[in-house]
Image (cartoon, rainbow, N blue to C red):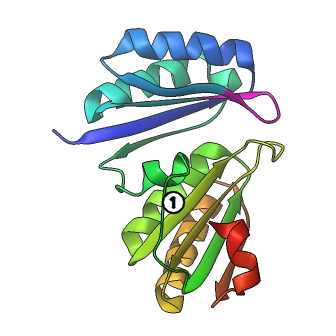
Amino acid sequence: MARAIGMVECTTVSTGFKAADEMAKAADVEILQAEVTCPGKFVILVAGELSAVRASVDVAAGKYSDKVMDTFVLGNPHESIFPAIYGTAQPEKIEALGILETYDVAALIVAADLAAKTAIVDLIELRLAKGMCGKSYMTLTGSVSAVQAAIDHAKAEAGDRGMFLDSSVIPRPSDKLMKYIM
C-alpha cells in the first residue's frame, strides 16, 4: 500500500496534545510533527498507510470537533512536499515564482500537493504558520505557464476550503530578490 500523510490543526494547544495522543493510539501512524504554531494553534502531522492515517485523523477530528480548525488526508503525497516543509528544497533556478497564501496550515499543504501534481513545478518552501499569525504560504517555481497552472489549481482548492488569502505569479523575479526566496 502507498504511504499517506494526514493532519489535524487544532485551535488550542491543550486539545492539540490530547488529539496527538489519541491519533497515535488509534492507528499505526508515525507522528512527524506535533507542535504549536501561531497564534497558539497546534498542528499534528502523521504518516503511515492510508487506512491508518485516515483512522487516526478521523478519531481526532470526531472526538475534538469543536477545537479542530481543519484536517486532511493525502494518499501518495507529492515527493516535493517534505523538502518544502522542512526547508531543504534546492531548485536549480527560478524561472517564474508562484506564491500562494492561506489562512491555515492544512489547506496550504493540500493546495501545495495539488500544485505539484498539476504541472512541472518545483516546490521551494511551505511556510507553515510560524511567525505569520496563523497564516501559511508556499513558493514554487517552473515555467511561467506551469507556475500559473499550478497556482490556479492550488487557489481553487484553497478557495473551496474557504482558506484562500492571496496569490501571485512573478515571471523572472529580480536577482535582488533571490536571497529572500531560497
Give the magenta range: 36-43
Across and down, in percent, residue 55 comes to 36, 24
Q: Residues within 10 Å of mark 1 (few under 14, many from 20)?
A: many
Along the viewing direction, whichever of 128 and 2 lies nearer the viewer: 128
> Residue 155 sits in which quadrant?
bottom right
Q: As drawn, is 25 to the left or to the right of 45? A: left
- Report the residue at 48% width, 11% height from top: 22
Q: As drawn, is 9 to the left or to the right of 56? A: right
> Residue 71 sits in which quadrant?
top right
Q: Secondary structure at mark 1?
A: helix
Which residue is under mark 1?
112
Give the quarter of the figure containing the C terminus: bottom right
Give the quarter of the figure containing the N terminus: top left
Work out which residue is located at the far left of the displayed protein and give it.
1
Q: As drawn, is 59 to the left or to the right of 54? A: right
* Position of 40 relative to 139 (above/below): above
Along the viewing direction, whichever of 22 and 177 lies nearer the viewer: 177
Across and down, in percent, residue 27 comes to 33, 16
> Residue 137 sits in which quadrant?
bottom right
- Report the residue at 56% width, 16% height from top: 19
Across and down, in percent, residue 58 comes to 45, 25
Residue 165 within the magenta-colored segment of the rendering: no
Along the viewing direction, whichever of 135 and 95 lies nearer the viewer: 95
- Report the residue at 38% width, 78% height from top: 120
Residue 40 within the magenta-colored segment of the rendering: yes
**Which amino acid, by three-letter code, is at mark 1?**
Ala
- Magenta: main secondary structure: strand
